[in-house]
């Protein structure tokens, strides 16, 4: 059994199915069992691929379409979602 | 939370939706099998971000919903027995049996307990040697490793007072049943990401080939779902039918070997009745010979059960994707989460519960009709 941090709440979780997991790793937990380690490199690459999507279309898009998009754009401080989270032993349930 | 929040980014979601709009040239019907994905789609309004012709059909991926009524009634009978501590996951408590639910059994004096993990039930068995502790083991392949470990631990500890009421169902046979049913309109599937984190996706290429359907392993966050849908649409437009992994940070082709090893030891494949669908061959797991002594159905031998479904309930049609929840005449009227007629309105993975809790009170047709009316007014 190990201890896993769910965004602040720490629970006892069975780690028998993920022998490769070490302290500091992120993992998927279901009903008290860790099932898979989150591959952080792959996660970052997936996010990078998402950020690439639609970029070209935005650059080449018509003025009208660009204006319409800007008009409904949410006021986020970090439009491409790259704001760094404070690292912690968070997990996905 | 790291690796969750990033996958909920609204701006990226808008961009991905635009990609789907750009790629789709004709209508397509895509089924997400997993109830957890249904909830995320409805909660985040993913279906409303898609082009008008792309329809998400909600599949039977709600293990609580597909547990046969007869098994629910057996659970109620076992839970009502003196000397029994009956444990289950929370949402099972309100699932209606023929006559009442576990919550009512508790109210009448039965020892019914909500647990987070099956290991909690094993703990209870160790701490209460004079009671019979039963765990209601409901789930797809995602939950099976937990249940397998619980009986494995029980056997290792020589526990005589722990048993498992098993209701395990499998995804690949469900896909076969959907594709094989007359009148099926599904053209592609989003595969359940966490099921695949356990089982991998090596089981799916033969299905993609046999039914000529794209199968995309998909996660649960908005960006994951949009990416899975996008990939399915890209394949459909190109006439391809392959298995793709859109949840690579968690799912590998082989899956979790340690889990699969114990699953093979603890469970055997068996035919299973799916509530609202019927018997699907080789679609479930039961305890293997070596672990059969822990089977609650055999230990308690309940007889004399007369099951009766509500005549108004259309859960079966919802589970097979034939109707959307809001199209059921009882939705929001005779049937609400507080007074559910069927499991789909009360399970955390049920489509009816998703529609009700996220305010989807009118059907897609009505919504489209209302939109057309509005734009008519605006354009003069």
Image (spheres, coloured by chain):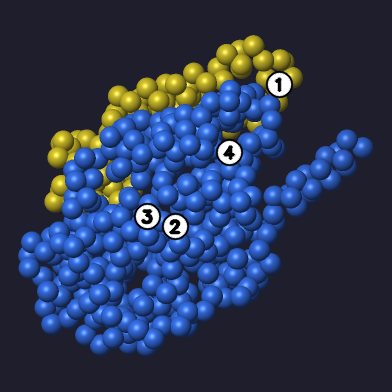
Chain colours: A yellow, B blue
Front position in the image: B264 or A86: B264
> From the viewer's perspective, is the residue at label 3 or at label 1 nearer?
3
Mark pair 2, 1: CA separation: 50 Å
Q: Which mark is residue B187?
A: 4
Q: Nearer the observer, disc 3 or disc 4?
A: 3
State how far apart marks 2 and 4 are (Cα).
20 Å
Please, what secondary structure does the residue beneath circle 4 have?
loop
Q: Nearer the viewer, mark 2 or mark 4?
A: 2
Q: CA distance from mark 2 to mark 3?
A: 7 Å
Discs 2 and 4 carry the same chain letter: yes
Instruction: Mark yes or no: residue B318 visible.
Output: yes
- Name the residue beneath numbered marker 1: A65
B109 shown above or below B273: below
Question: Where is residue B343 shown, x and y percent of the image?
Answer: 49, 67
Which residue in the protein does label 3 denote?
B282
The image quadrant of residue A65 is top right
Residue contact at pointers 3 and 4, CB within 8 angstroms: no
Q: Secondary structure at mark 1?
A: helix
Disc 2: which residue: B280
Determine the image quadrant of residue B198: top left
Residue at horizontal 43 percent and vertical 30 percent from the top = B244
């Amino acid at each position: 059994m190990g201890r896993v941090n769910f965004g602040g709440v720490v629970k006892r979780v069975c780690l028998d199915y993920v022998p490769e997991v070490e302290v500091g790793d992120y993992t998927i937990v279901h009903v008290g069992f860790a099932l898979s380690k989150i591959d952080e490199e792959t996660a970052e690459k997936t996010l990078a691929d998402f950020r690439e999507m639609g970029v070209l279309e935005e650059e080449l898009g018509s003025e009208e379409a660009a204006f319409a998009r800007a008009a409904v754009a949410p006021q986020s401080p970090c439009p491409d979602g790259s704001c760094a989270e404070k690292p912690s032993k968070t997990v996905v349930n | 939370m790291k690796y969750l929040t990033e996958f909920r980014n609204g701006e990226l979601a808008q961009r991905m939706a635009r990609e789907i709009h750009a790629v789709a040239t004709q209508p397509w019907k895509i089924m997400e099998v997993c109830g957890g994905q249904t909830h995320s789609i409805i909660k985040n309004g993913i279906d409303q971000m898609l082009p008008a012709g792309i329809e998400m059909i909600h599949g039977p991926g709600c293990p609580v919903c597909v547990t046969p009524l007869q098994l629910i009634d057996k659970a109620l009978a076992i839970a009502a027995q003196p000397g029994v501590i009956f444990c289950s996951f929370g949402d099972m408590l309100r699932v209606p049996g023929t006559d009442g639910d576990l919550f009512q059994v508790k109210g009448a004096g039965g020892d019914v307990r909500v647990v987070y993990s099956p290991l909690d039930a094993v703990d209870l068995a160790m701490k209460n040697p004079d009671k019979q502790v039963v765990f209601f083991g409901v789930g797809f392949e995602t939950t099976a490793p937990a249940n397998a470990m619980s009986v494995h631990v029980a056997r290792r500890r020589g526990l005589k007072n722990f048993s498992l009421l098993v209701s395990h169902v499998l995804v690949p046979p469900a896909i076969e049943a959907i594709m094989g049913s007359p009148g099926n309109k599904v053209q592609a599937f989003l595969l359940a990401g966490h099921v695949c984190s356990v089982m991998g996706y090596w089981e799916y290429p033969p299905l993609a080939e046999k039914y000529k359907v794209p199968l995309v392993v998909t996660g649960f966050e908005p960006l994951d779902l949009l990416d899975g849908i996008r990939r399915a649409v890209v394949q459909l437009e190109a006439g391809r039918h392959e298995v793709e992994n859109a949840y690579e940070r968690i799912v590998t082709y082989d899956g979790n070997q340690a889990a699969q090893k114990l699953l093979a030891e603890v469970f055997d494949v068996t035919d299973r009745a799916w509530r609202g669908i019927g018997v699907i061959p080789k679609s479930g797991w039961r305890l293997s010979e070596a672990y059969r002594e822990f089977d609650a159905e055999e230990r308690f031998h309940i007889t004399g059960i007369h099951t009766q479904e509500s005549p108004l309930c259309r859960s079966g049609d919802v589970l097979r994707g034939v109707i959307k929840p809001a199209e059921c005449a009882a939705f929001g009227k005779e049937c609400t989460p507080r007074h559910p007629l069927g499991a789909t309105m009360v399970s955390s993975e049920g489509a009816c519960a998703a529609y009700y809790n996220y305010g989807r009170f009118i059907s897609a047709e009505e919504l489209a009709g209302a939109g057309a009316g509005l734009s008519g007014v605006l354009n003069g």
